[in-house]
Amino acid sequence: DEEQLHLSRKEFDLLHLLAVKPGRILTHQVLLSTLWGASYVTETHYLRVLVGHLRQKLSDDPMQPKYIITVQGVGYRLKA
């Protein structure tokens, strides 16, 4: 709706990663290692919190997402 959003650096980086490959699943491990580094690949809680904040800013309902789709146990993808 041409409304400007204020995103944190991590939120922007996550959205950018998803937007570069719309429709493609990015695994938890890929996202975590890219955003926080290789030592964080098992810290999925960080990713869940970040996705939750980004969804909230995008007004994306996690129960019926329009933008960021959760692939249970695997990762996330941006709806193409």
Image: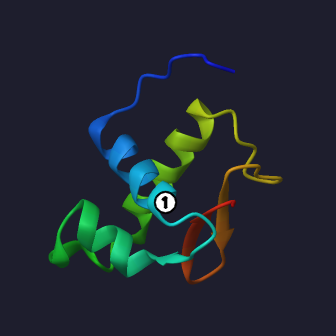
Is 60 drawn above or below residue 49 in the view shown? Answer: above
Pinpoint residue 20: horizontal percent, then vertical percent.
45, 60
Residue drawn at the location 17% of the way across and 69% of the way down: 37
Task: Report the amino acid beneath label 1.
Answer: Leu
- SS assignment at label 1: helix
Q: Measuring from the top left, give residue 7's x and y in whole percent.
A: 40, 30
Of residue 60 and residue 44, the one placed in the foreground of this image is 60
- Number of numbered tags placed on the structure image: 1
Q: Residue furthest top?
A: 3
Q: Nearer the viewer, residue 1 or 9?
A: 1
Q: What residue sits 57% from the left and 75% below the top?
A: 24
Counting from the top left corner in percent of width and height, residue 3 is at 59, 16
Q: Residues within 10 Å of mark 1 (few under 14, many from 20)?
A: many
Q: Picture quarter containing residue 44? A: bottom left
> Is 6 placed above or below 12 here?
above
Q: Going by the image, does 22 lie left or right of 30?
A: right
Q: Is residue 25 left or right of residue 9?
A: right
The image position of residue 40, as x and y in percent, is 24, 72
Residue highlighted by disc 1 = 18
Q: Is residue 35 above or below residue 58?
A: below
**Identity of the residue drawn at 58% across and 63% down:** 22
Q: Check the picture and name the quadrant holding the N terminus.
A: top right
**For residue 72, which quarter of the picture?**
bottom right
Q: How is the image coloured?
A: rainbow
Left/right of residue 77 with respect to residue 66 in the rendered view: left
In the image, residue 10 sits, relative to residue 2, either above or below, namely below
